[in-house]
Image (tube, coloured by chain):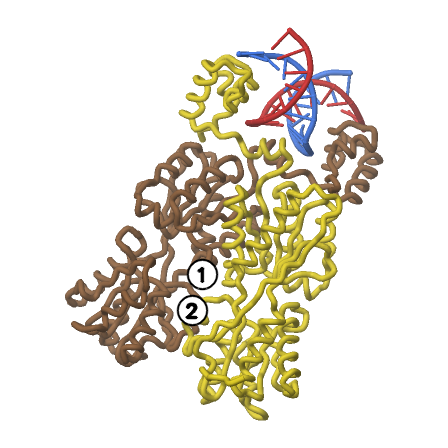
Chain colours: A yellow, B brown, C red, D blue
Amino acid sequence: MKHKITLKKIAKEFGVSISTVSKALKNSHEISSEVKERIQAFAKYYHYKPNSLALNLRNQKTKTIGVIIPEIVHHFFTKVITGIEKLANEKGYNVMICLSNESYEKEVLNLEMLANGVVDGIIVSVAKETEEKDDYRHFNELINNGIPLVMFDRVVDQINCNKVIADDKGGAFLATEQLIKNGCSHIALLTTPDYVTVGNERKEGYLKALYENNIPANQDLVVKVNDKISIEEQLSVLFEGGIIPDGIFAVNEIYAATVMKVARNFGYNVPEDIEVIGFTDGLISEFTTPSLTTVAQHGRTMGQKALELLLDEIDSQDTHYQYKTSLIQTDLKIRNSTKKVEFHN
Amino acid sequence: MKHKITLKKIAKEFGVSISTVSKALKNSHEISSEVKERIQAFAKYYHYKPNSLALNLRNQKTKTIGVIIPEIVHHFFTKVITGIEKLANEKGYNVMICLSNESYEKEVLNLEMLANGVVDGIIVSVAKETEEKDDYRHFNELINNGIPLVMFDRVVDQINCNKVIADDKGGAFLATEQLIKNGCSHIALLTTPDYVTVGNERKEGYLKALYENNIPANQDLVVKVNDKISIEEQLSVLFEGGIIPDGIFAVNEIYAATVMKVARNFGYNVPEDIEVIGFTDGLISEFTTPSLTTVAQHGRTMGQKALELLLDEIDSQDTHYQYKTSLIQTDLKIRNSTKKVEFHN
DNA sequence: CTGTTAGCGCGTTCAG
DNA sequence: CTGAACGCGCTAACAG
């Protein structure tokens, strides 16, 4: 285990003091050019790099920002990370990614760990379990410690910080309205349990579209999917009797892709018998048959915006910084799970 | 910006020395229980946490391991990360994820940054551009600096370190043989450019299966896909004349899913006319129509194994540590893009 | 039982 | 032009 080269070692090598070496390497005018040249050449040869830890400790900042996401296997989150990463690199920041795995406890642990001097600021999307417990003290503590925090996607109203959200309600509205325009009148909603905030937002957009088009909402057409048990079984109820939907809006890609499978198993064709729209940035949508019409979330843009806000706060000296909430537009990506129709408005 | 509580502040508060506080908090028997109690209560109340940076600097280790992956939007890599993360957390390690975006330069930068005292060890899958340039000096330098390194999936033969690879050749062999058993005789291969090592391994498995079954290899049935231009167009050549394949083995999920689309556009049915097998851990495979038969890579297992090896090396005091290469078994996940047939061997 | 000292690696006064 | 001293926050060896 060879040891890394330090100022100290270089100093010893040249028989000068540590601070002389430090200055020489920073090209200080205080040092004779002859000494500077020799030291610099030596340092270059041995690939001298100041130790980050020491620098961080001294400067009380790390040029690193932490990101906590609930799940990394979700395509949306990877898009967000891509956005964060890109901007971070341009700005000379490193990114440390942590996973909460939707667990409250792990979220708290991650937060504690990051808060401990490891990062200059934190970007987080709240774990489902945390939303369920409705306990956000760990975030408040973070803020009290003066660590800049940005929430994205799954945000918490009660917490006072910068936020980035997709226009969930607007996107859901767009999607539902599209189905209505295409002639659907029995539109089902596949959503998450109530405690998931984005699910609720999307539900509201769905309801708003129904309302504005004078279509009565029907509880029987709303399925709150529990991820812990078989999705297919839960979706089957839609086709087992009662009113069969002619349009389906799903709050995510998996539900949308799955419901197409289930519908087909029950003998229904998409989009002829039933039209389907999902909500996602995911990859799956392009490869299903038919390919899925979706509401695009622009994850990368969200990530960039989140980092922008974070750096903004980090750089700000303001005692009373004004927190913002940035709403990222969503829009419809028409594919083949909806009918192509011409309108005459 | 409130400031974090430190030993120094507690010491001042109680009018004792810093080391007394330090000991008190560690419940040292050297300190009177009365003082200990008061200090501990105070520390608890103010949520005292030792500053990680200071600890790291002092201990010359960070309990953090770095992971460099080429792309985070690939499902395989997220699975690997999940595996790494899980074990890391059990062992009390944090994980820092960096993206090279398949770029040589960014890989070098990431490596430099991580090597600088930030992590205790590094797990990496080599960027395509690096494989193309065939320049691995940055890895050697890392090793010379005594920083434990594990390579996974896309590994480099010339570098002497721990490695974890999927049994690419074996998996490809399995897949190809399955197609042969199902009656295919004109089996196409969709692969990557030559410099991508895993692509080559898989190609070898494919060729071996052909050879062992006395099927002549046919260059016209091998497509080396260039990711930078339209995949669909490149795959179309298979169906535009000459020998139309009756079986296709693709070295990844995207190629496999795309070729099914293209085949359908040309009027061929999967699996009736053409059977397809992909190579991946991906999500898409389950949602295509028909769902894709694939070679499963067990990304999570690979991640776990990689971390295991890394910790092994970190903990090892051996001057002459023996590097290992761990081969992770692959196996066939039969879905609907291949025919269900019964054999009588 | 408590305090002093030193050191992890670095940059920055301030003296010389 | 050069070096000694200090501080970032913490622990451990050593004194008292």
- Along the viewing direction, whichever of A195 and A310 lies nearer the viewer: A310
Residue sitting at 65 percent across and 68 percent down? A196
Dot 1 or dot 2, earlier in sequence:
1
The reply to whether discs 1 and 2 touch (Cβ–Cβ < 8 Å) is yes
**Is disc 2 on the same chain as disc 1?**
yes
User: What secondary structure is marked by label 2?
Assistant: helix
Q: What x and y, as percent, mark residue A231?
A: 54, 77
The residue that disc 1 covers is B75
Q: Where on the picture, by quarter, is residue B210?
A: bottom left
Q: Is residue A241 left or right of residue A108?
A: left
Q: What x and y, as percent, mark residue B139?
A: 39, 39
Q: Quadrant of the N terminus of chain A?
A: top left
Q: What x and y, as percent, mark residue B301?
A: 45, 57
Chain that bears disc 1: B
Q: Is residue A279 left or right of residue B219?
A: right
A147 up-or-down from A342: above or below: above
Residue sitting at 75 percent across and 41 percent down? B2
Number of marks present in the image shown:
2
Mark 2: amino acid: Ile
Q: Is residue B285 left or right of residue A154?
A: left
- Along the viewing direction, whichever of B94 and B167 lies nearer the viewer: B94
The residue that disc 2 covers is B284
Chain that bears disc 2: B
- Along the viewing direction, whichever of B314 and B270 lies nearer the viewer: B270
Q: Marks 1 and 2, how far apart in space?
A: 9 Å
B326 up-or-down from A101: above or below: above
Mark 1: amino acid: His
Q: Residues within 10 Å of mark 1 (few under 14, many from 20)?
A: many
Residue A263 visible in the current orientation? yes
Q: What x and y, as percent, mark residue A222?
A: 62, 82
User: What secondary structure is marked by label 1?
Assistant: helix
The residue lying furthest to the front in this view is A345
